[in-house]
């Protein structure tokens, strides 16, 4: 389901996961229709007991077939007039794909999802929380009564929203919610800012209340907690164990009653293994750990966010302005990895909408989207590469599963082409596919 934070409990339980086809847009119109598999796709859709007519003159009446065979998507183009596009590439005949897949027929965009549970209703305009994120939020709710919670997610993946959900669903919801970005604290002042200070503790020191005391009776959200130095980590552990804060320069502690949400874009277990984070603090904090999915794992949410942001950009100019995204813009956004997640997508789409308005158009096209929007930030290659033989190995070590899947999709699963695009040897691509469990599919 695409719903609000309050709807997350409905995303758990129910029938076991089943593949489904989600129609997210047809032309410039948003669509919320979930189809069972297999399905006959075209201007007239037939899937199980579901039949539906689409007003898209770029689609053939009998355009494509989508089915699931042995855990792989089977997409078959039926000699359509304008082609079937799978993950941005036109296909001929049939192809097989793994994972969630973006399909465009004419000006209609479909998302093939491995788990269709919860997809369906469109979100209210103010929020987009699809089933993947809703399941994570439901887990946060289940742990809201715990004294501590660890959130793991990339920058922009919604960690503060999840922390607020923990606060609002927990026993201290009537108290304050205090958010602290540990990465932004200047070096040497973290202890004073977090735990407070007493007058005379150091030159210029005054009586000051720290963030822990400010959050008394409520929740303290420590974002990027792994950035705290070892001495501050040790004092944080003591607060968790004694439920008292000792301000800098004080001889006795001050009791505090708080829930703590610690978040990091890094894997804290890995940070413990690398001795960059105290193991005793990790085990005390990680009473429960919730992983927030990145935006690229929520392709239906990407479509909804693009539609929402484009409409909002039009209203910001004039309440009567009706601005809409083209289907190819939605397709392109669904295929990009968005390392900056929702924050990055929102800014990029708003800029694209602004450019369309400046050109006098009420449709935002894919050409309005910056070519770098949603793409990984990479450094330019050095002018001289004395260790060129080592570079493919270094590149391969930095590639995640989504990058490999996207490269294979763009290369129509021709693995030699995908390897060249990634800057690695073909044998290294085979190893990455094995490492990430990416099933081989038909080439071409």
Image (cartoon, helix red, strand yellow):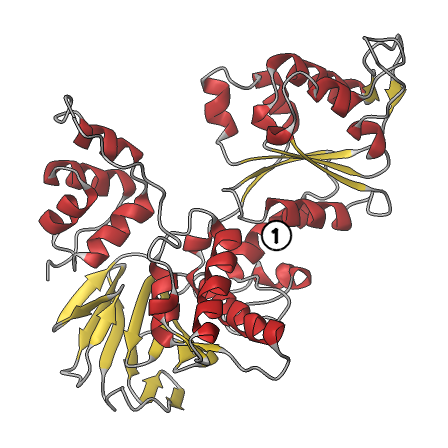
Q: Which residue is mark 1?
A: 137
194 left or right, relative to 362: right
Question: In terms of depth relative to the viewer, which is nearer, 298 or 21?
Answer: 298
Local crowd size for mark 1, using a 10 Å CA cut-off: few (<14), some (14–19), many (≥20): many
Residue 59: quadrant of the picture:
bottom left
Quarter of the figure that contains the N terminus: bottom right
Residue 258 against residue 323 in the figure, above or below: above
- The image quadrant where one finds the C terminus is bottom left
The answer to whether one can see residue 196 in this image is yes
Q: Is residue 272 left or right of residue 281?
A: left
Residue at 21 percent across and 58 percent down: it is 410
> Please, is residue 253 above or below residue 171 in the view?
above
Question: Where residue 400 appears, x then y in whole percent?
Answer: 32, 41
Q: Is 419 placed left or right of 340 in the picture?
A: left
Q: Position of residue 204 (x, y in %)?
A: 83, 13
Residue at horizontal 35%, vertical 45%? 376
Q: Position of residue 154 (x, y in %)?
A: 49, 42
Quick check: 341 above or below 364? above
- Asked whether the viewer can see residue 286, the reply is no
> Element at badge 1?
helix
Where residue 173 sits in the image (x, y, percent)?
A: 82, 47
Please, is residue 140 above or below residue 118 in the view? above
Name which residue lies at 39% across and 76% down: 326
- 200, 228: nearer the viewer: 200
Q: Quadrant of residue 64?
A: bottom left
């Amino acid at each position: 389901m695409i719903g609000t934070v309050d709807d997350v409990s409905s995303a758990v339980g129910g029938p076991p996961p089943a593949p489904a086809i989600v129609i997210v847009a047809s032309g410039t119109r948003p669509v919320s229709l979930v189809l069972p598999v297999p399905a006959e796709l075209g201007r007239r859709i037939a899937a199980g007991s579901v039949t539906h007519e689409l007003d898209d003159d770029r689609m053939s009446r009998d355009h494509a077939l989508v089915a699931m065979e042995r855990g792989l998507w089977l997409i078959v183009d039926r000699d359509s007039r304008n082609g079937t596009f799978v993950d941005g590439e036109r296909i001929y005949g049939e192809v097989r794909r793994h994972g969630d897949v973006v399909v465009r027929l004419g000006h209609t965009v479909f998302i093939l999802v491995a788990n269709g549970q919860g997809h369906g209703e469109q979100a209210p305009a103010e929020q987009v929380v699809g089933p993947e994120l809703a399941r994570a939020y439901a887990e946060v709710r289940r742990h809201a009564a715990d004294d501590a919670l660890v959130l793991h997610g990339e920058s922009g993946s919604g960690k503060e929203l999840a922390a607020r959900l923990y606060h609002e669903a927990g026993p201290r919801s009537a108290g304050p919610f205090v958010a602290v970005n540990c990465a932004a604290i200047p070096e040497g002042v973290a202890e004073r800012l977090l735990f407070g200070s007493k007058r005379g503790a150091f030159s210029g020191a005054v009586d000051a209340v720290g963030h822990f005391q400010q959050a008394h009776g409520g929740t303290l959200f420590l974002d990027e907690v792994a950035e705290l130095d070892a001495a501050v980590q040790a004092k944080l552990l003591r607060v968790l164990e004694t439920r008292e804060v000792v301000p800098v320069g004080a001889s006795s502690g001050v009791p505090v009653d708080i829930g703590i949400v610690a978040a990091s874009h890094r894997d804290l277990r890995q940070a413990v293994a690398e001795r960059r984070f105290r193991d005793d603090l990790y085990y005390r904090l990680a009473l429960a750990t919730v992983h927030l999915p990145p935006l690229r794992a929520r392709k239906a949410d990407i479509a909804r966010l693009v539609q929402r942001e484009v409409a909002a950009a039009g209203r910001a100019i004039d309440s009567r302005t009706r601005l809409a995204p083209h289907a190819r813009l939605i397709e392109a956004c669904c295929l990009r990895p968005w390392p900056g997640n929702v924050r990055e997508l929102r800014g990029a789409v708003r800029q694209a909408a602004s450019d369309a308005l400046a050109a006098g158009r009420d449709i935002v096209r894919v050409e309005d989207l910056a070519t770098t929007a949603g793409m990984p930030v990479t450094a330019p290659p050095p002018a001289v590469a004395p260790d060129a033989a080592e570079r493919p190995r270094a590149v391969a070590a930095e590639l995640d599963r989504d990058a490999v899947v996207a490269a294979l999709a763009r290369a129509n699963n021709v693995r030699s082409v995908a390897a060249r695009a990634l800057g690695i040897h073909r044998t290294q691509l085979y190893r990455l596919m094995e490492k990430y469990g990416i099933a081989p599919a038909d080439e071409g």
